[in-house]
Image (cartoon, grey):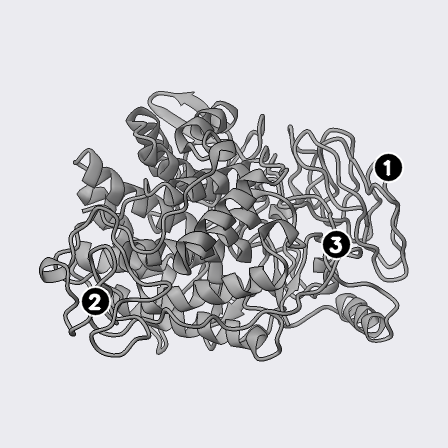
Amino acid sequence: MITPVRDSAVALAAGLDADIPYGHGGRVPSVAREPGTRLATLLLSLCVAAGLLDCGASDSGDATGGSHAPAGGTSATGGVPSGGTHAAGGTASVGGSLATGGMANGGSSSVGGAHSTGGVPATGGSYSPGGSSATGGNSAVGGSSTVGGSSAAGGSSATAGSAATGGNSAIGGTAAPGGTKVTGGSAGTAGVTSAGGTANTSAGGMANTGGSKPVGGSSASGGSSSTGGASTTGGSVSTGGTTGGGGSSSSYFGFQPVPNSQNTANFNPATWYTTWKGKFYVDCGGGQARIANGQGSNNTVSEGMGYGMLLAVGNADKTAFDALWAYYKGRVDSNGLMNWSIDGCTSGNNNAYAATDADEDVAMALVQADAKWGGYKTDATNLINLIKKYETAPGPPSYLRPGDAANNGGKGDGIVNPSYFAIGYWHVWATYLGDTFWNQLATDAYTMLAAYQKLTISGSTGALVPDWGNSQGQNPYGSSYYYDACRTPWRVAVDYAWFGTAAAQTFLQNVSSYVDGKGGIGSLSFDKNSAFLGPFALSGTAVSQAKADAYLNAWLSTTMDDTPYFQGSLRGLCLLLANHSFPKGP
């Protein structure tokens, strides 16, 4: 089953390699575990089996823009991990407690904030209600926390943040105490499109719930589908995931959510962007700028650069866009891809390797900028080709690698991060470059996503995907749904909005069934922020207008903490897509 995990102490018990981080605040899963972590895993497993420990989700601290280091990378000085990590053999931070067996409990504080109620007790340990505050930092592997920062593995305290050897991961971990495990949910029904745009109806019928409707676009051949059925509100969906002839690039499929009067202001992406930029955009001078990995942080991760460029082009901020792109180009590795973590405005190659999701977002931002302003096609084409060369595997099945480090830093082939599957981008690139490889990669990715969902649907536990899996659609690294996996519905919703892909619709309807089985957006047992709730809300766009509206307003009406870099970035991106202000380019 998929377990919603929101505290990272369990990562140590999951057998993670603390020296090789990868993913948003995560690490590459370690198949060969050290004896100590094997014992911790065994004890936790026995504990769960005996009913001695509640392994459900709790209201532990949110991720504050944790960095994702690729295999072989190094920890970011000053980086803020996603939810923080706990010390293996170290001491708990101020206000926390030390867990017997080598794992500090108490969770982590977000940038400038306090840890929420509770923490994760390690095997044989205990936790103190209220967790550990550490005044903005947490302990890194092998070190002890200090007020104002954290020690990296063998290193010195971070400046204005914590460096926790690249962040944390809940891969293979168990949920923190105080919450519930994933239950309920079933596969979605109806809305699966057939050739020509007819959705689950007989030939000639109108499209039903979840059918296509390019807003403002014209339908194929004057509004009728290519196989006898009429489309809804113009446009059609073909089985291959492309628009029926006649749909324009500005058209969107699915149901655009409409805010109620209370959320009209909250729905404005430009307003949010102004606030977000004021906190995290840092001018380096010389026509370069970076996105800080937490307000006041001296660390920048490539993930943030991708988010920043997407938000800049989506909000027509060309000056910021060009400055961010200049920063990226000045810090590439030997493969021409940006090193995943950089200290401040330092330039050059620090041999930290690249992270694929960041490179994808930067490349798609260049495509969007080329459509909006012109002059970026060469840069976009070159970067997309580098992603293909260094960050994909031809298969079969073809799959997206998590970074460009050789052999995934010694972890072997086949490791994938489902939240990196930017399938909508790939469909665009197939046409933009005239390269059908990207369509095959998309097809294989949907096969994996469907397999991940079946792992939970068959057990009546929902339709979530794990933070990490393999190219065979399995989750040998654990089944936690944390600050990596939470982005997956957003990624899939982009493809559905742009192309009306049937597999995307099915995926999102399954997610919607899970949401409804839990009582709606506001009742989900995850951290209350837009990293989780925004992507969940977008699943309604593939179901019905009523569902899209209800999910949007429930998301924006929830009391949330979107002040950290990561949560705030996801809020801005989800708002752009919900507003239909996230175009697929030419």
Front-lying residue, 46 or 211: 211
| Quadrant housing residue 114 | top right
The residue nearer to you, when weighing 573 against 72, is 573
Q: Look at the picture and state if 570 lies above or below 57.
A: above
Between the residue at mark 3 and the residue at mark 2, the CA separation in whole angstroms equals 43 Å
CA neighbours of label 1 inside 10 A, class few (<14), some (14 to 19), many (20+): some
* Residue under numbered circle 1: 95
Left-right relation of 561 to 349:
right
Position in image of residue 553 (x %, y %): 51, 43
| Above or below 198: residue 270 | above
The front one of 6 and 41 is 6
Q: Amino acid at mark 3?
A: Ala
Decide if residue 526 is on the left or right side of residue 495.
Answer: right
Which residue lies at the image location 53% right of the left edge and 69% below the top edge? 469
Secondary structure beneath label 2: loop
Q: Quadrant of residue 77?
A: top right
Residue type, label 1: Gly
- Looking at the image, which is closer to me, 352 or 584? 584
Residue at left offset 58%, top offset 52%:
521
Label 1 – label 3 distance at C-alpha: 16 Å
For mark 1, give the secondary structure.
loop
Few, some or many residues within 10 Å of mark 2 (<14, 14–19, 20+): few
**Horizontal relation, residue 201 to residue 339: left or right:** left
Picture residue at 22% right of the left edge, 60% below the top: 430
Give the secondary structure at mark 3.
Answer: helix
Q: Badge 3 is on which residue?
A: 9
Q: From the image, which quarter does the N terminus lie in?
A: bottom right
First-in-chain label (1 vs 3): 3
In the rendered image, which residue does mark 2 sit on?
A: 436
